[in-house]
Image (cartoon, helix red, strand yellow):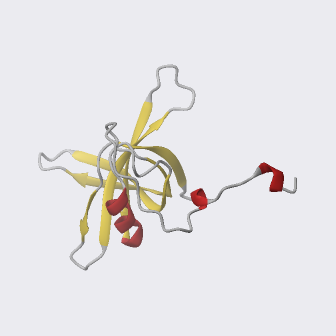
């Protein structure tokens, strides 16, 4: 079984486009903090998403946003222009979940809040006296 789940922050804005046969893609990298590191060390993972997931990433993600990525590891071997053999490791994303607010940029800049649709759960007011438990 080849399955990976990562939670981290984008290190740069996604780079997206369309392949020659019309399939959209999104490439980005995330920094994942090591769980028991004393020095806040992080590991960096290259991620590629395809299709509607890629479209969503390209339209909504920016540097600094926190995401959860689930997918599989893909390892490719190739020969560089100088003749040396290289290995590329990337995560082929099946799912990307946006964990941080879209109105917060990665460099601390404020972005306008998204428009509410009127049926957002944050529009609800809960009164403790009305709860049955």
Pick whichever, 8 or 99, lies toward us: 99
Residue farthest to the bottom? 21
Tell me what residue is drawn at x 30 percent, y 71 percent: 24
Tell me what residue is drawn at x 71 percent, y 54 percent: 126
Residue 71 x/y as whole percent: 49, 59
Pick whichever, 111 or 11, lies toward us: 111
Residue 85 x/y as whole percent: 24, 47
Residue 101 x/y as whole percent: 46, 49
Residue farthest to the right? 133
Q: Is residue 83 above or below residue 39?
A: below
Residue farthest to the left? 82
The answer to which quarter of the image holds residue 92 is bottom left
Q: Is residue 39 above or below residue 50?
A: above
Tell me what residue is drawn at x 56 percent, y 32 percent: 35
In the displayed structure, does residue 32 sit left or right of residue 129?
Answer: left
The answer to which quarter of the image holds residue 76 is bottom left
The answer to which quarter of the image holds residue 56 is bottom left
In the displayed structure, does residue 77 sit left or right of residue 73?
Answer: left
**Numbered label tally:** 0
Residue 124 x/y as whole percent: 63, 59
Tell me what residue is drawn at x 82 percent, y 56 percent: 130
Quarter placement of the N terminus: bottom right
């Amino acid at each position: 079984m080849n399955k990976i789940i990562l939670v981290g922050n984008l290190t740069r804005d996604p780079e997206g486009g369309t392949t020659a046969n019309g399939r959209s893609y999104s490439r980005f990298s995330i920094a994942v903090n090591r769980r028991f590191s004393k020095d806040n060390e992080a590991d960096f993972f290259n991620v590629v998403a395809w299709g509607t997931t890629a479209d969503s990433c390209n339209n909504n993600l920016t540097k600094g946003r926190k995401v959860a990525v689930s997918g599989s590891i893909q390892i490719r071997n190739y020969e560089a222009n100088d003749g040396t053999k290289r290995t590329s490791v990337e995560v082929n994303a099946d799912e990307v979940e946006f964990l941080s607010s879209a109105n917060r940029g990665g460099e601390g800049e404020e972005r306008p809040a998204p428009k509410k649709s009127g049926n957002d759960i944050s529009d609800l007011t809960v009164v403790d006296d009305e709860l049955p438990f």
